[in-house]
Image (cartoon, rainbow, N blue to C red):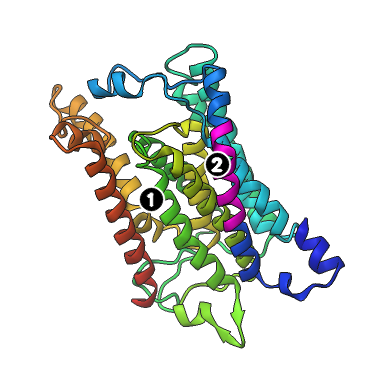
Amino acid sequence: MLYWLLYQQAGINLFRYPSTRILLSAVMSLLLSIWLGPAFIRWLRRMAIGQEVRDDGPAAHKEQKQGTPTMGGTLILSCATFPTLLWMNLENRYVWFVLIILLGYGLVGFIDDYKKVALKNPKGLAGRWKLVGQFVFGTIAVLFLLWATPYNTKLFIPFVKPSIFSPDIGWLYVPFAVFVLMGTSNAVNLTDGLDGLAIVPTVISAACFLVLCYAAGSTLSGFNLAEYLRIPPTPGTEEVAILAAGICGAGLGFLWYNAHPAEVFMGDVGALALGGALGALAVVTKNELASAIIHGVFLAEALSVMLQVGSYKLRGGKRIFKMAPLHHHFELSGWPEPKVIVRFWIIAALLALTGLATLKLR
């Protein structure tokens, strides 16, 4: 809206540049989330919107985390979405694709949290209905992307030059992209089990895709950054970097209150939405396969759950890990919670840098 007013109407050239609006989005979302955080947490406490810790988690969590205000993801989504709408070109359909996923998956998570907190149902929304909601919003968003933009259905393989091998899978791309969206969303949700554990890798991944969105969509002074990095050029994705910046800023502001010991948790409304948005950023930049590296921490957490469940069912109750997801295994192995958290953060940063490095190794 401010982009339309200040540049398209008033003609102030400064706001023509995505780099200016990316910075403004990041700063505004950060300041908004820090400013609104205390009042929001007080409101959650007044409304008795507290975390219900499951009995199958580590025993210490029941005492330490029970009743901590939850559904803080609504603050993240609000503080990321509002600056994006202010500074984006509202005609850009790539941004709307990511917003459909962010807000749609956020709605699914909100219903799940509401059932847990307000209706006192510790299981929340049944797992199959969560998947149905994610599938519906994901399919709608991907079909919109293919219909409303010049988006192509090619796959770009890490470490392989697009000119050598980049298969076009046609309409099979729809279920593939939806799988990426749902898989990333649920992987982030599984990671969100310790104070600050999920939000920092989310910010790191969003920052990584901010660079990729900007590179894919921008040409700087005649220098084609997309061509130099050997990534598929997608004019228009530079506007998506504004939303990625909003997620980074809002996420860091949320970390101010979510750092150990946490004053608030993001809940499923935040985890499902942010995971879906990260998947959407991977899709829109044509880095669906490379995102497995960039989102390596989330992938490891999801795989640990699948391996644990598979082992338990197929090996007569035998487990691979002391507890899944993976972060609980290290907790029960004697690592203090802050050590688990910070080490996962470091690994997330290394994997994001490795994902970016694959671009130059093509």
Give residue 256's position: percent from left, percent from top.
Answer: 45, 43
Depth check: give the residue in front, 212 or 176: 212
SS for callout 2: helix
Q: Is residue 97 magenta?
A: no
Name the residue at the top extreme.
Answer: 120
Give, as a single range, the part of the protein colored magenta: 26-39
SS for callout 1: helix
Q: Earlier in the sequence, mark 1 or mark 2?
A: 2
Residue 177 seen in this snapshot: no
Name the residue at the bottom extreme.
Answer: 222
Point 58% across, 43% down: residue: 35
Classify 10 Å Cα crowding around label 1: few (below 14), some (14-19), many (20 and above). many
Q: CA distance from mark 1 to mark 2?
A: 15 Å
Give residue 345's position: percent from left, percent from top.
Answer: 31, 51
Give residue 173's position: percent from left, percent from top.
Answer: 52, 54
Point 54% across, 34% down: residue: 38
Side of 162 where 16 appears, left or right: right
Quadrant (top left/top right/bottom left/bottom right) for the C terminus: bottom left
Q: Is residue 349 above or below residue 251?
A: below
Amino acid carrying label 2: it is Ile
Residue, disc 1: 201
Side of 173 where 66 appears, left or right: left
Amino acid carrying label 1: it is Pro
Depth check: give the residue in front, 278 or 34: 34
Classify 10 Å Cα crowding around label 2: few (below 14), some (14-19), many (20 and above). many
Residue, disc 2: 76
Depth check: give the residue in front, 222 or 45: 45
Residue 343 seen in this snapshot: yes
Q: Is residue 169 above or below residue 252?
A: below
Give residue 32's position: percent from left, percent from top.
Answer: 60, 46
Point 70% across, 59% down: residue: 87
